[in-house]
Image (cartoon, rainbow, N blue to C red):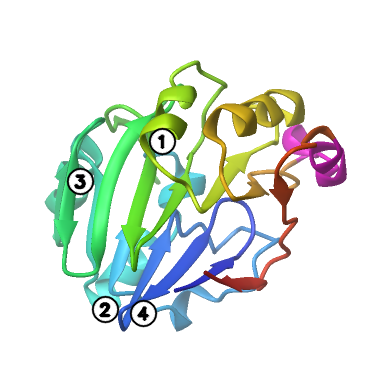
Amino acid sequence: MKISYHGHSVVKIETGGKTILIDPFITGNELTDLVASEQSPDIILLTHGHNDHVGDTMEIAKRCNPLIIAPNELAVYLSWQGFQTHGMNIGGSNTFDFGTVKYTQAFHSSSYTTNQNEIIYTGMPAGILFTAEGKTIYHAGDTSLFGDMALIGKRHSIDVAFLPIGDNFTMGPEDAAMAVEMLNPKLVVPVHYDTFPPIKQNPQTFKELVTSHEVNIMKAGDSIDI
């Protein structure tokens, strides 16, 4: 399984001949190395409805019709736009031909703002546990620190965890470091920082706070094989 990071919260997973994009915020993301028109994923996984996470989902889907998996209200909204969707909800899991997706809690908000400045409610925000090839990836989405991360870590053996560290809208470095202790992943990657002025952070600060787990500060385009 190949996993790559592409700025903000964008993660690409290549497994079993399928390509999965998580939260494909590409256009308007100055930190990404991707070009939206060049992406043809088989699956898009969304954590919540904010525009910096839904990102280019609809433009990509118009071109290559991926399966979009999202929290239910967001999935319904996207289905109304004519796209192929599969709605899920927190605590639920489903096994697809490319792997198993399970949605977890995330403490945040979730809405999509249209070009007409209309705010669409898109259900509960979530994190994602993705399992394939005997490996489990946890993408926390946008969230604060919460105690049930300890239960997630106890219930699942996490190989790679992508955790937000930007503060202001999500956990900052200190809370994210505490989350690492509860989740107990084999490897942690900081995400959701530096994209906008309110979430400017030095990821090295986070790395120094995490003393008992491996931290990989990935740049856009970096990849790992697990």
In the depicted view, which residue is nearer to us: 111 or 2?
2
Query: For mark 4, does the 10 Å Cα neighbourhood hold few (<14), some (14 to 19), or many (20 or more) residues?
Result: some
Q: Is residue 208 visible?
A: yes
Q: Is residue 72 left or right of residue 204?
A: left
Where's the N terminus, which quadrant? bottom left
Q: Are marks 2 and 4 in contact (CB under 8 Å)?
A: yes
Judged by depth in the image, the label closer to the viewer, 4 or 1, is 4
Answer above or below: position of 123 versus 158: above
CA gap, disc 3 and disc 4: 19 Å
Q: Is residue 55 left or right of residue 170?
A: left
Q: Earlier in the sequence, mark 4 or mark 1?
A: 4
In the depicted view, which residue is nearer to us: 92 or 153?
153
Taking the spot 54% from the left edge, 63% from the top edge, the residue there is 26
Q: Main secondary structure of the magenta part?
A: helix
What kind of element bears circle 2?
Answer: helix
Q: Is residue 219 left or right of residue 103?
A: right
Q: Earlier in the sequence, mark 1 or mark 2?
A: 2
Q: Which residue is mark 2?
A: 64
Specify the quadrant of the image occupied by residue 223. bottom right
Q: Which residue is mark 4?
A: 40
The amino acid pointed to by label 2 is Cys
Q: Are marks 3 and 2 in contact (CB under 8 Å)?
A: no
Taking the spot 36% from the left edge, 79% from the top edge, the residue there is 40
Q: Which residue is mark 1?
A: 117
Query: For mark 1, does the 10 Å Cα neighbourhood hold few (<14), some (14 to 19), or many (20 or more) residues?
Result: few
Bounds of the magenta segment: 197-208
Taking the spot 57% from the left edge, 21% from the top edge, the residue there is 145
CA gap, disc 1 and disc 2: 27 Å
Q: Which mark is drawn over residue 75? A: 3
Specify the quadrant of the image occupied by residue 109. top left
Q: Earlier in the sequence, mark 3 or mark 1?
A: 3
Taking the spot 13% from the left edge, 50% from the top edge, the residue there is 80
